[in-house]
Image (cartoon, rainbow, N blue to C red):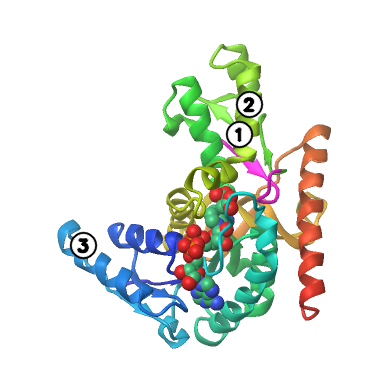
Amino acid sequence: MARAKIALIGAGMIGGTLAHIAAREELGDVILFDIAEGTPQGKALDIAEASAVFGKDVALKGANDYADIAGADVCIVTAGVPRKPGMSRDDLLGINLKVMKAVGEGIKAHAPNAFVICITNPLDAMVWALQQFSGLPKEKVIGMAGVLDSARFAYFLAEKTGVSVEDIHAWTLGGHGDDMVPMVRHSTVGGLPLPDAVKAGFLTQEELDAIVERTRKGGGEIVALLKTGSAFYAPAESAIAMATSYLKDKKRVLPCATFLTGQYGLSDLYVGVPVVIGAGGAEKIVEFETNDAEKAMFAKSVESVKGLMEACKAIDPTLV
Ligand SMILES: NC(=O)C1=CN([C@@H]2O[C@H](COP(=O)(O)OP(=O)(O)OC[C@H]3O[C@@H](n4cnc5c(N)ncnc54)[C@H](O)[C@@H]3O)[C@@H](O)[C@H]2O)C=CC1
Ligand SMILES: O=C([O-])CC(=O)C(=O)O
């Protein structure tokens, strides 16, 4: 059977890392696309040469022409700009919205059957705009944020409790901003919901509260450390998990920015919720039962996403 074709739109920090992981995992042949000339070609060649060391058979190619993404099974979009210290993700909206228009048109023309994973920030508004610009079915266009946010939550819990990351299951809901909602009652340490893990002495309530706050601001913590850009290893791993579930029809339940059609009482927007990812794309949204406090936090996060959608519409009135 032919190898899958994975198009990476944007060959910067995340794009290059995605190419490296996809090659090492032998997930498929990789096209690295960017407007910068030489960058995608150089990264593709470097990783192709590495493949002779790690011993995986994949083809890698750098490109500046959308024609090269033709027939891609998966497109992962990181094109645009990242934030620097002192900026919020929302400050990227104007410049990255223009990038989403160009990328959406490129995908529409050359890879209309692909499963598209958007990573570019501000994530929930960008994936919503990208779906419209590309015209692809909504279940085939999805945003990466929740896998990253919940991975941060899980890592901080593992670090504090001393329990293996493999035995921690953490969930976040909502938009990819500082008002995202780490789901304390639905996340578990060794099978114990976090309130029970506190009772059992794995961590204190104060430690849990601090982890929730650190998770919400996890992106900014890395930006402040790196100074020149934002996180790229964990974001790339997160998108690869989503692409793998699609390509292998694994039907993993992953928190992703997904188009809602009535779930959680919401319609016509993208926001982070748990969703089954399989060969059909975003196949089924999982609806957590939420209490009043969780509902209020989720509603606040959704309001932020709606505000960004309105800002996009003001810039580009073709968006509806
Ligand atoms: N959703 C999430 O959880 C996360 C989102 N991000 C976002 O991902 C995006 C990419 O981050 P990095 O890879 O670190 O940035 P980067 O600056 O290293 O790479 C971006 C690449 O996009 C390219 N580019 C710009 N305009 C383009 C266009 N019109 N067409 C094709 N390529 C174009 C640039 O030449 C550059 O190579 C940023 O917007 C960042 O905020 C970053 C981390 C996590
Ligand atoms: O914080 C940023 O700008 C990048 C990002 O979305 C993250 O790492 O969560």
Residue shown at 32%/68% (left/top)?
43
* Residue 171 % position (x, y): 60, 39
On the image, numbered disc 3 is attached to which residue?
50
Magenta span: 170-178
Whether residue 173 appears in magenta in the rendering, the answer is: yes
Q: Is mark 2 on a helix, strand or loop?
A: helix
Q: Using the rendered image of the protein, determine whether residue 110 is visible from the camera's viewpoint.
A: yes
Which circle's residue, 3 or 2, is located before the other in the chain?
Answer: 3
Mark 2: give few (<14), some (14-19) or many (20+) Cα within 10 Å. few
Which circle's residue, 1 or 3, is located before the other in the chain?
Answer: 3
Q: How far apart are marks 3 and 2 (CA)?
A: 41 Å
Q: Are marks 1 and 3 in contact (CB under 8 Å)?
A: no
Q: Is mark 1 on a helix, strand or loop?
A: helix
On the image, numbered disc 2 is attached to which residue?
210
Q: In which quarter of the image is residue 139?
A: bottom right
Q: In which quarter of the image is the N terminus?
A: bottom left
Mark 3: give few (<14), some (14-19) or many (20+) Cα within 10 Å. some
* Residue 98 % position (x, y): 65, 76
Answer left or right for 236 relative to 319: left
Q: Quadrant of residue 65?
A: bottom left
As shown in the figure, which amino acid type bears the numbered disc 2? Answer: Ala
Q: Do the residues labelled 1 and 2 touch (CB within 8 Å)?
A: yes
Q: Choose between 279 and 51: the one closer to the eye.
A: 51
Above/below status of 138 relative to 230: below
